[in-house]
């Protein structure tokens, strides 16, 4: 990378609070952005809210959303962009409303550290693995390398650092 390179980073997540749909918040805007990046021949780095990703992968009624989001993540990687880990742990309490919509009855897990050490580490590792698996559909050797704490909640760093190490993450972009 030359000294004048710029890395554009984007958060790939549904709206906080009462969520919009994946179509409105993720798929349509990201497709448009990917088209512009392709036209400019500019790489991007997308910090994917992989806690959301885990929820749609485990919710049978969200299977179509999971497929479409997964296809888009694969497109990102296939087109030369990076996908990296971002987490909004409040997704562990999210409730499916249908038609791509979710509600958050509580925000008690807004900060990763509220889950406790073991559960926080397990969630970071599982989220990293889920994201890497989708990226490997496009590039079999892909590794997720970076972490960005959702809501800037990265302190105290000891548990997050331990979780990053367990997940093989080497860059903190919080």
Image (tube, helix red, strand yellow):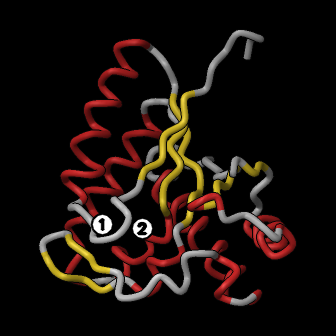
Mark 2 Cα within 10 Å, few/some/many (few <14, many 20+)? many
In the picture of the structure, the residue carrying the numbered disc 2 is: 53
**Residue in the image at 35% along x and 30% along y:** 34
Image spot of residue 85 (x, y percent): 59, 57
Query: Which corner quadrant of the image does residue 7 belong to?
Result: top right
Which of the numbered marks, if any, corresponds to residue 75?
none
**Residue in the image at 66% along x and 65% along y:** 153
Q: Left or right: where does residue 6 sit relative to residue 56?
A: right
Number of labels in the image equals 2
| Residue positioned most to the left | 99
Image spot of residue 45 (x, y percent): 54, 37
Reply above or below: 152 against 93. Answer: above
Nearest the viewer among 89 and 27 is 89
* Residues at circles 2 and 1 in contact by the CB criterion of under 8 Å: yes
Q: Left or right: where does residue 18 sit relative to residue 98?
A: right
**Residue in the image at 58% along x and 50% along y:** 84
| Real-space Cα separation, disc 2 to disc 1, in angstroms | 7 Å
Nearest the viewer among 49 and 17 is 17
**Residue in the image at 24% along x and 65% along y:** 65
- The disc, 2 or 1, on the residue closer to the chain's N-terminal end is 2
Which secondary structure, mark 2? helix
Which secondary structure, mark 1? helix
Reply above or below: 66 against 90. Answer: above
Query: Which corner quadrant of the image does residue 98 belong to?
Result: bottom left
Image spot of residue 24 (x, y percent): 20, 51
In the picture of the structure, the residue carrying the numbered disc 1 is: 66
Mark 1 Cα within 10 Å, few/some/many (few <14, many 20+)? many
| Residue positioned most to the right | 158
Reply above or below: 95 against 62. Answer: below
Image spot of residue 35 (x, y percent): 30, 25
Reply above or below: 107 against 87. Answer: below
């Amino acid at each position: 990378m030359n000294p004048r390179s710029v890395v554009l980073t984007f958060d790939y997540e549904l709206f906080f609070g009462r969520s919009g749909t994946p179509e409105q918040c993720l798929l349509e805007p990201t497709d448009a952005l990917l088209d512009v990046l392709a036209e400019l021949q500019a790489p991007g780095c997308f910090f994917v809210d992989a806690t959301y990703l885990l929820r749609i992968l485990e919710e049978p009624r969200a299977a179509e959303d999971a497929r479409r989001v997964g296809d888009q993540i694969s497109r990102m990687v296939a087109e030369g962009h990076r996908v990296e880990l971002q987490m909004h742990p409040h997704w562990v309490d999210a409730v499916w409303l249908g038609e791509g919509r979710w509600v958050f009855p509580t925000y008690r897990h807004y900060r990763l550290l509220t889950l406790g050490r073991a559960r926080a580490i397990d969630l970071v590792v599982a989220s990293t693995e889920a994201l890497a698996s989708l990226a490997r559909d496009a590039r079999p050797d892909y590794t997720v390398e970076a972490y960005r704490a959702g809501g800037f909640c990265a302190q105290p760093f000891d548990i997050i650092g331990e979780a990053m190490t367990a997940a093989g993450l080497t860059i903190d972009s919080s």
